[in-house]
């Protein structure tokens, strides 16, 4: 029943889209921060 409601109703689909967007934003933020940390590490004087 829960799966039918999740994939069959407008609110269920909206929830799935919201969860997917949050995961994508989180992954993008993680990649951004890792790149900035590596950049900071390479630009640090004396290293």
Image (tube, grey):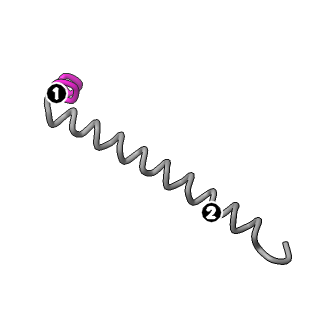
Does residue 38 appear left or right of residue 10 in this picture? right
Which is closer to the viewer, label 2 or label 1? Answer: 2
Q: Position of residue 29 (x, y in %)?
A: 49, 55
Q: Position of residue 15 (x, y in %)?
A: 24, 39
32 versus 13 height, above or below? below
Asked whether 28 falls inside the magenta stretch, the response is: no
Q: Pointer 2: what residue? A: 36
Dot 2 or dot 1: first in sequence order is 1
Q: Quadrant of residue 44?
A: bottom right
Q: Residue at 84% across / 72% down in the picture?
A: 47
Tag 2, which secondary structure? helix
Q: Position of residue 16 (x, y in %)?
A: 28, 36
Please name whichever residue, 12 or 17, is drawn nearer the observer in this view of the structure: 17
Q: Quadrant of residue 5?
A: top left
Q: Which residues are magenta?
A: 1-8
Please name whichever residue, 44 or 14, is drawn nearer the observer in this view of the structure: 44
Q: Pointer 1: what residue? A: 5
18 versus 2 height, above or below? below
What secondary structure predominates along the stretch shown in magenta?
Answer: helix
Tell me, for residue 26, which label it has, or none. none
Q: Residue at 63% across / 57% down in the picture?
A: 35
């Amino acid at each position: 029943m829960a799966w039918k409601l999740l994939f069959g109703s407008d609110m269920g689909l909206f929830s799935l889209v919201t969860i997917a967007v949050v995961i994508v934003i989180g992954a993008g933020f993680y990649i951004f921060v890792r790149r900035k940390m590596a950049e900071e590490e390479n630009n640090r004087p004396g290293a």
